[in-house]
Structure formats: C-alpha cells, structure tokens
Amino acid sequence: MILVFGTLCLDRVRRIASLPQLGGYAEVYDEEVLLGGEAANTSNALNQWNANFSLVGNVLGDGEHADLLLKKIVEKGLPTHQLKLRPGVTPLCD
C-alpha cells in the first residue's frame, strides 16, 4: 500500500482578460474553485491508476470551505477515512 501524506486545499482560479499595468488592476470575469494540494494531486493520479493507497493530509478546517473541500475529495473518489474536519482555517490557494 502507498501512503500519500501532504497538503489538501482548495485552489481558487480566477480568469482575467490580460495582466494589468503596474499599479493597476484586472477585472475577474470567471472564477473556479478546484481541489488542490500535492497530496490531492498525487492521490488523484494514483486513483486513476487503480493503485492501492491511503490519503492522510492536513486538518481540513471547519465551516463552508471545509465542507466544499471534503465534497471535492469525495467527488474524485479519494479515500476519506484518515481525514479530519476540526476547527481551523481551511487551506485556500489563490
């Protein structure tokens, strides 16, 4: 069995038309929240290869972001029995 240990987070991807001028800003025209982190990415690949693995990651936090992170992990068909929902901030990468 393979043990995957590492970061599980939400990746927030924002799309803009072009990079702004120095000191300027860009309007976001689309935003998507994806499953991210090296442990999630590795587990997703192992799952697609039908490998025998267990996923152990950071504490997922609590609240709306934690629920969304857990939902995305489940949607990918990744194992959740070692994952913990506990008070704290859910990792979010912009």
Image (spheres, grey):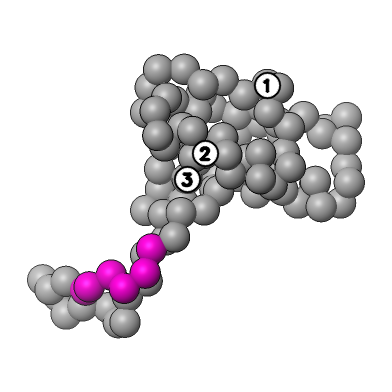
Is label 2 in contact with label 3 (beta carbons under 8 Å)?
Answer: yes
Q: Which residue is mark 3?
A: 10
Element on which disc 2 rests? helix
**Residue 61 lies in quadrant:** top left
Earlier in the chain: of badge 3 and badge 1, it is: 3
Earlier in the chain: of badge 1 and badge 2, it is: 2
- The quadrant of the image that shows the N terminus is top right
Q: Residues within 10 Å of mark 1 (few under 14, many from 20)?
A: few
Q: Is residue 29 magenta?
A: yes
Furthest toward the left, the residue is: 23
Q: Amino acid at mark 2?
A: Leu
Q: Residue at x 86, y 51 (%)?
A: 49
Where residue 71 sits in the image (x, y, percent)?
57, 39
Q: Amino acid at mark 1?
A: Gln
Q: Which residue is mark 2?
A: 69
Element on which disc 1 rests? loop
| Magenta: main secondary structure | strand
Q: Which residue is mark 1?
A: 82
Furthest toward the top, the residue is: 86
Q: What residue span does the magenta drawing correspond to?
A: 26-31
**Residue 77 lies in quadrant:** top right
Q: Residue at x 66, y 39 (%)?
A: 74
Q: Is residue 12 magenta?
A: no
Residue 27 higher or lower than 81, as above or below: below
Is label 3 in contact with label 1 (beta carbons under 8 Å)?
Answer: no
- CA gap between label 2 and label 3 equals 6 Å
Please indicate, yes or no, whether residue 36 appears anywhere in the rendered image.
yes
Residue 13 higher or lower than 52, as above or below: below
Where residue 27 sits in the image (x, y, percent)?
22, 73
Residue 61 higher or lower than 34, as above or below: above
Where residue 60 sits in the image (x, y, percent)?
50, 28
- CA gap between label 1 and label 2 equals 14 Å
